Image: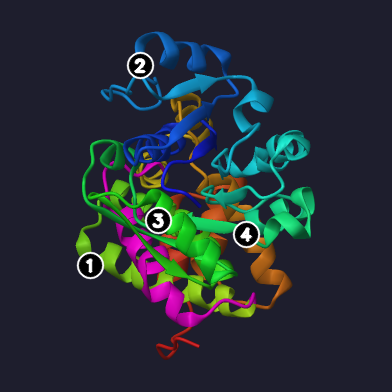
């Protein structure tokens, strides 16, 4: 992969736009695809994106709502649509991708119904040959802070070390530092599962509980993430790194976290419907919670925090009742297996 690439970023939300900005600053020719034509038009005309307030885009970032023109000729394709539409977007894009293109998934979620991770979804849509060079990008990275060039570290996981290193090189700047990893399953699950725990962390804050409660919830949440990850073939150590603990800390404590914000407002007594109606961006954890619960049950993995989050967002249980249920579970030893 040469120093200067033709790249396509599929998904013009805050995170996709921030990644496009990293690639532009790295010197690549970048096309940013938006499903919403008005967003693409706004970026082209004003060099602003309503999903990334306060950030001015460089003139050389090209935005389009034409998916085919976005991907044609691209050597690097970054899939960063909301997880529940990744399949439909990539199915449409697949016939027009270069056969030797490197595809990177940066969406953090699990597909409802199929319970597939994003690498599994893309494998079904793109085929085995393209997946040889496939990578996942994840880690603690608020889009606004990346766009503001705050020093940030992420993980690029690929089954091919060569592919991971090529993507690492494509994204590395003085403020955006990717590390490589070969645990695709663990890195993907870390990015998806932490959103569910962040919902719970926001709820405890919304209920008015201080730092003790958040620390306990994050630590036990990490244990749940690791249990499910290991059951699905991930390495435990991955969850101690940037894609696990790093992203969990950020998403559970940072004020820019969408999932924590949804949880906080639930803890304050608002309904989920009014919260989601009020939000422009997607809080992946709301839908991922259901998929996580089903995966855990399918594999016989105990995930009490995820179970209670589902009871709140799907069945209307109050956050206060859910917290009490967690605290009054049968006494147990602290285990990490």
Alpha carbon of mark 2 to alpha carbon of mark 4: how far?
Answer: 32 Å
Numbered disc in front, either 4 or 1: 4
Magenta range is 232-258
For disc 1, the neighbor class at 10 Å (few under 14, some 14 to 19, many from 20) is few
Numbered disc in front, either 1 or 2: 2
Residue beneath label 4, please? 133
Q: Earlier in the sequence, mark 2 or mark 4?
A: 2
Alpha carbon of mark 4 to alpha carbon of mark 3: how far?
Answer: 14 Å
Residue beneath label 2, please? 47
Q: Can you say whether 185 is above or below 287 in the image?
A: below
Numbered disc in front, either 3 or 1: 3
Whether 253 is among the magenta residues is yes
Left or right, 329 with reference to 69:
left
Q: Nearer the viewer, residue 297 or 251?
A: 251
Q: Which mark is residue 212?
A: 1
Q: Earlier in the sequence, mark 1 or mark 2?
A: 2
Q: Secondary structure at mark 2?
A: loop
Alpha carbon of mark 2 to alpha carbon of mark 3: how far?
Answer: 26 Å
Dominant secondary structure, magenta: helix
Is residue 191 in view from this perspective? no
* Marks 2,4: beta carbons within 8 A: no
Alpha carbon of mark 1 to alpha carbon of mark 2: how far?
Answer: 43 Å
Q: Earlier in the sequence, mark 3 or mark 1?
A: 3
For disc 4, the neighbor class at 10 Å (few under 14, some 14 to 19, many from 20) is many
């Amino acid at each position: 992969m040469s120093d200067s690439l033709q790249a396509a970023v599929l998904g013009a939300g805050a995170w996709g736009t921030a990644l496009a900005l990293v690639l532009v600053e790295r010197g690549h020719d970048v096309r940013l695809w938006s499903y919403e034509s008005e967003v693409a038009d706004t970026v082209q005309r004003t060099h602003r994106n309503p999903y990334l307030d306060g950030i001015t885009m460089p003139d050389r970032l090209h935005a389009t709502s034409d998916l085919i023109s976005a991907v044609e000729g691209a050597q690097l394709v970054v899939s960063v649509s909301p997880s529940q539409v990744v399949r439909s977007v990539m199915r449409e894009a697949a016939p027009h991708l270069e056969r030797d293109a490197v595809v990177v998934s940066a969406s953090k979620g699990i597909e409802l119904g199929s319970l597939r991770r994003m690498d599994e979804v893309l494998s079904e849509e793109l085929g085995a040959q393209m997946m040889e060079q496939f990578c996942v990008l994840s880690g603690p990275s608020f889009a606004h802070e990346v766009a503001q060039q705050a020093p940030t570290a992420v993980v690029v996981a690929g089954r091919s070390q060569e592919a991971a290193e090529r993507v690492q090189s494509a994204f590395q700047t003085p403020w955006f530092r990717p590390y490589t990893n070969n645990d695709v399953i663990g890195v993907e699950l870390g990015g998806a599962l932490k959103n569910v725990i962040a919902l719970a962390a926001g709820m405890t804050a919304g209920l008015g509980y201080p730092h003790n409660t958040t620390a306990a919830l994050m630590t036990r949440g990490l244990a749940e993430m690791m249990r499910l990850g290991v059951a699905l073939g991930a390495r435990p150590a991955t969850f101690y790194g940037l894609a696990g603990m790093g992203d969990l800390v950020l998403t559970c404590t940072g004020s820019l976290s969408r999932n924590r914000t949804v949880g906080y407002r639930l803890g304050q007594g608002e309904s989920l419907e009014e919260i989601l109606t009020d939000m422009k961006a997607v809080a992946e954890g709301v839908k991922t919670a259901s998929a996580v619960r089903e995966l855990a049950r399918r594999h016989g993995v105990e995930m009490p925090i995820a179970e209670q989050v589902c009871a709140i967002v799907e069945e209307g249980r109050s956050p206060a009742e859910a917290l009490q249920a967690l605290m009054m579970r049968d006494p147990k030893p602290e285990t990490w297996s």
